[in-house]
Image (spheres, rainbow, N blue to C red):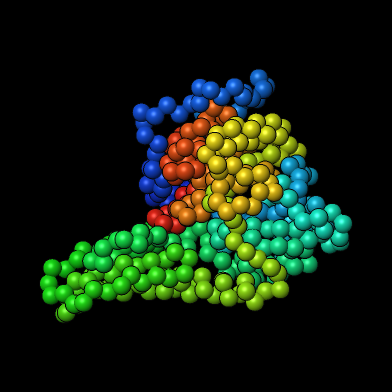
Amino acid sequence: MLRRLVKSLTNGHSHTGVTKDTLFDPIPADCDLKCHSCTIKYPASFKIEEDADLWQTSDGWATHILIATGKSDWVRNVDHEKGSIMEALSKAKKPTNGKLMVSASNMCPPPEYFTETPQPTTCIILPSWMQVENVTPNDVNELIDKFISPAPTTTTPMVSVAADDPPDEAVEIISKGANEIAPAPASPSTTATAPQKNSVGENGLVARKTDTRDSQGTNDDLSLTSAMSNLSVASRVTQNAAELAASSYLKSNECPHDYLILLCSHKHRDARCGQSAPLLLKELRRQLQPLGLYRDLDDYRPGGVGIYFINHVGGHKWSANMIIYRKKAGQGIWLARVKPNDIEAIVRWTVLDGKVQPEKIRAGFDRCKGLTSW
């Protein structure tokens, strides 16, 4: 009730202090963002709401699970599908690490999905990029306890540091909490001790220590201690998650793709989604194939872009909705009002470079910056 009241008073927008430009870098203003060779168009009847500001028009999430169903359209509410994992998750205990977004997808389930009861299928958990095999509705508590609740979330810190960074680099560590960046302390100019190596934690978490430390101690020491403490906690969480996953009877591995693009195709919720998703997929394939990045549903080669249809995500009046996950960058980017002639720019700038058209972004997170839109 309180949440709905706040959203009504703020026109549906939350206030985190994060702006479009601080969350994701904008595409350069002088770029031509339309694909002039694109011949694909939406039907003349395809009408959407064009005026409202899209920024922060969706709720946040901690983890996102994709469930293979082999279908591109579903009953109106997928958690009403009898005997499905979606139904089982809706009735199970909630994860302890925050809100779980559940999406049925057109990922290919194993053959047993169509012949056995209960139906074993494949799930991908994001942003941990963990793929869990042969999950049935009876396994949902195991899935939550061993793979979802312990997993890193959209607000779990992550930073990648180049291997050739100089050892005297100041500490550069992110996120004491959601929507905050811990500032890098300046290197003291006093007596130095021997250089210290980078401290590398699980899941790409890295702290860079300076080799110039005041022997008497400074405020920078406190910042370093605090930053290292945050890294240590995050590293332990990730290590515990790996240990729990390894102890499960469910088989798991890392999702092989470097990028995922999710397109709403839920025709039973909105006809425009059933129209837009196949057309956008066709243009995505045209743009990605020359780059060697396109992956079919049954193509599990390492790297590349996996593209899946998913059920209702909300905001269909702003179709088409597209959620992009970038593994190495630790980002999730939710776009709307996507048209076929936007795809060339989205592939070039958003998928590959993490830059966005500000007027198309609804929500997102960046674990390297320690920022979310919610």
* Residue 256 visible in this rendered orientation of the protein: yes
Q: How many marks?
A: 0
Front residue of 77/69: it is 69
Residue 105 horizontal side relative to residue 214, left or right: right
Front residue of 297/340: it is 297
Vertical relation: 34 (above or below) 1: above
At 23% from the left edge and 66% from the top edge, which residue is drawn?
Answer: 168
Of all residues, the one furthest to the left in this rendering is 190
* Residue 50 visible in this rendered orientation of the protein: no
Residue 164 horizontal side relative to residue 313, left or right: left
At 12% from the left edge and 72% from the top edge, which residue is drawn?
Answer: 190
Front residue of 134/176: it is 134
Q: Quadrant of residue 353?
A: top left
Residue 35 horizontal side relative to residue 159, left or right: right
Q: Position of residue 206 (x, y in %)?
A: 38, 66
At 75% from the left edge and 68% from the top edge, which residue is drawn?
Answer: 139
Of all residues, the one furthest to the bottom in this rendering is 216
Q: Position of residue 133 (x, y in %)?
A: 71, 62
Q: Position of residue 313 (x, y in %)?
A: 63, 45
Q: Position of residue 187 (x, y in %)?
A: 19, 66
Residue 5 horizontal side relative to residue 232, left or right: right
At 37% from the left edge and 34% from the top edge, which residue is drawn?
Answer: 28
